[in-house]
Image (cartoon, rainbow, N blue to C red):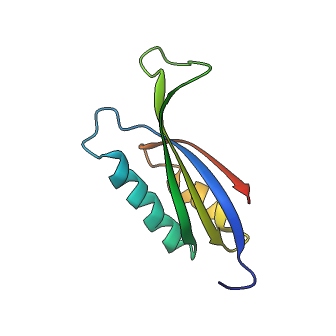
């Protein structure tokens, strides 16, 4: 690991309604994006399906949550958000320094 790399933990809410992709395929796609931005995945935890505390859409009351630990350069969170912004399978993204 490079000394300029930092550790991050990213939480994703995944939406696969009406899609043929499985949760594992979506996670593999996210891991691929992390490697594209010069990051290295160190761990993946599938938290499972959870109901939302505040429902904004009656037809979408819960989703799968996944946490991915990775290391990468300081600008990795911004690049990751930008690359996943148009991905319809990633409903929400939260990245924090670990």
- Please determine whether, in this image, residue 41 is positioned above or below residue 59: below
Residue 5 falls in which quadrant of the image? Answer: bottom right
Where residue 24 appears, as percent x and y from the top left, is 35, 52
Q: How many marks?
A: 0
Farthest bottom residue in view: 2
Where residue 85 appears, as percent x and y from the top left, is 53, 49
Q: Is residue 64 left or right of residue 82?
A: left
In the foreground, 14 or 98: 98
In the foreground, 25 or 59: 25
Name the residue: 48% across, 26% down.
Answer: 62
Name the residue: 56% across, 68% down.
Answer: 42
Q: Is residue 63 left or right of residue 73?
A: left
Q: State which quarter of the image contains the C terminus.
A: bottom right
Farthest top residue in view: 58
Name the residue: 33% across, 54% down.
Answer: 25
Q: State which quarter of the image contains the N terminus.
A: bottom right
Where residue 44 appears, as percent x and y from the top left, is 51, 57
- Please determine whether, in this image, residue 33 is positioned above or below residue 84: below
Name the residue: 49% across, 73% down.
Answer: 36
Where residue 43 appears, as percent x and y from the top left, is 54, 63
Farthest left residue in view: 20
- Please determine whether, in this image, residue 46 is positioned above or below residue 35: above
């Amino acid at each position: 690991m490079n000394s300029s790399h930092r550790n991050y933990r990213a939480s994703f809410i995944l939406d696969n309604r009406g899609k043929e992709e499985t949760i594992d395929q979506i996670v593999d796609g996210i891991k691929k994006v992390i490697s594209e931005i010069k990051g290295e995945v160190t761990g993946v935890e599938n938290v499972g399906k959870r109901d939302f505390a505040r429902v904004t859409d009656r037809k979408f009351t819960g989703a799968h949550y996944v946490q991915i630990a990775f290391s990468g350069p300081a600008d990795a969170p911004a690049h990751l958000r930008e690359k996943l912004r148009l991905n319809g399978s990633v409903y929400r993204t939260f990245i924090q320094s670990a």
